[in-house]
Amino acid sequence: VDITKGNVRKLRFIGQPGRMERLENKENRAERAGLEGNKMLPSEKKPKIIIVGAGPAGLFCALSLASSGLFTPIVLERGQPVEARGKSIGALIHRRSIDPESNFSFGEGGAGTWSDGKLTTRIGRNSGPVRFVLETLVKYGAPQRILVEGAPHLGTDNLVRLLRNMREDLRKMGGEVHFGNRASKFHIENGIIKGVDAECTEAHERHQSTGGKFAPVHEPGTTATFMGDAVVLATGHSARDVYEKLHEEGVELEAKGFAVGFRIEHPQKIINEIQYGKDWGGRVLTRRPSTDVVNAQHFSKYATDATQQHEGTLPVASYRLATNQAFDGEINRGAYSFCMCPGGQIVPSSTEDGELCINGMSFSNRDSLWANSALVVTVNPDDPILHEYRQTHGTLAGLHFQKHMERKACEFGCGDMTVPVQRLTDFVRGELSSTVPASSYRLGTKSAPLHDIYPKPLYNSFVHAIINHFDKQMPGFLCDEALVHGVETRTSSPLRVLRDANTLKAIGVDNLFPTGEGAGFAGGIVSAAVDGLIVAEAIKTNFFENPGAALFTTKKNSVGFEY
């Protein structure tokens, strides 16, 4: 079924919010790219589409619209361009100075830029839009191997180069990208969105005209107004101020399920042993001498004549754990590992002083001494633990619960970006750790009673899952060397911006198109990019009777997912 104005409704989230239909590609790659058969409009006649957020959803939406030749996408990003974003992160790591607009969460590429760069997804590994996203990433500089790997991963170092190439190409096609522009007001008149005000902060971008030096983009402290024909809301799940503003403006939001927990870190050599065994774990090779020596020394005690004859090398081991039987004392909850980073490090993903949230990341070589993963349990919209938050904050209860847990973590760590930690063995016993092992987290750790940070039902679920499920799935997972870090709360948005099933417009606001992870319609780099492409198709059919060749065809059977 080709996507046209008459049948675009068939490419939708159906059955339950967050569920995506299977999508299949057409054979003609040029048609899929949307670059053939589309008549280019003069720039003055192109509808202007303002896209708030330069994460995967926003960027892929912008690229699709620009390549059609029919639109002028105007991307507003509150943070820094990727080449300058590293300076903000450096200031955070070395001086504990948080830039609220440019950090591990905000900036070009979104939170996924300084993460593991995972390209796994639950919406169909070989479906049309997923293949299209992977091929597009390769086009802009990703390694070819992501097209064939079972669990493709980019790494932060590859994402930096790739994003710059995307931005340059978007501008060549007539698009605009503005950094240091934080959406502060939505112009809604008679139920129709007309534009966006943006508060300008200091941002710098490398320009050829300055010999590659950083040049200021906008005057800090000013307000810029961008008027257009439609607005795409593509902010990430950390843009809490945007969702509070939408709530004030009367845009319909609904609470959705989410998950919260910790980062757990093991020495990578321990994970190699659990996953590969004593005979083969010594064959792991990262090509970083200091890391490989540590692994070799660990496995030398198991060496036999047989192990010495093993040939070949293995990548660092990873894992995935999950159960829906994590008993909290009254009910079973879901518990699972999330965003596992082999050979990675733990980093701060906080966006405000007084709050502490962490995340994991890896570079493409995955060659650090540690393996880390989020370990989280589910929280439902009507969860009893949210009762007091619902009484005070209504629909925004989950958002304020997350903030409260982050403030508690900050207090547990003494408020200077030091992370509270606890040995996993002590965590399950509910005892403070007298000593703690080394950690990849560079701003320091402090022993703290993490068993007291979340409400008791969540703690009970963690303990039940770890003892009765995870340590049985991976014997040795529960060990003294494992270190729990607190807290990871931003696995997904606790809110969804309601959108019409047919038009993909926000309910009650014409020409506002919510998309991606922050709006509650994706969970990860690939699914967010796919949702951005779907919204781009909806915009095309909204403005033009015959917008050109369809990107994909659809089948009715769902391979959906729910967050």
Image: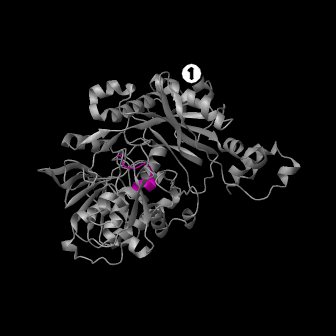
Specify whether residue 510 is painted magenta. Answer: no
Q: What is the x, y in percent for residue 264?
A: 57, 37
x 38%, y 53%: residue: 107
The residue segment tinted magenta is: 520-528
Q: Give the answer, above or below, for where 169 lies relative to 239.
A: below
| Residue kind at label 1, given as amino acid type | Gly
Q: What is the x, y in percent for residue 224?
A: 21, 56
Asked whether residue 108 appears in the rendered view, the answer is no
Along the viewing direction, whichever of 423 and 312 lies nearer the viewer: 312
Quadrant location, the C terminus: top left
x 83%, y 46%: residue: 303
Q: Secondary structure at mark 1?
A: loop
Asked whether residue 125 appears in the rendered view, the answer is yes
Along the viewing direction, whichever of 414 and 77 lies nearer the viewer: 77
Q: Quadrant of residue 57?
A: bottom left
Task: Report crowding for label 1: few under 14, some 14 to 19, many 20 or more residues within 10 A (C-alpha).
Answer: some
Q: Quadrant of residue 2?
A: bottom left
x 22%, y 74%: residue: 43
Along the viewing direction, whichever of 105 and 313 lies nearer the viewer: 313
Quadrant location, the N terminus: bottom left
Q: Give the answer, above or below, for where 271 lies relative to 412.
A: below
Q: Give the answer, above or below, for where 561 lies relative to 60.
A: above
Which residue position is annotated with label 1? 430
Q: Quadrant of residue 373?
A: top right
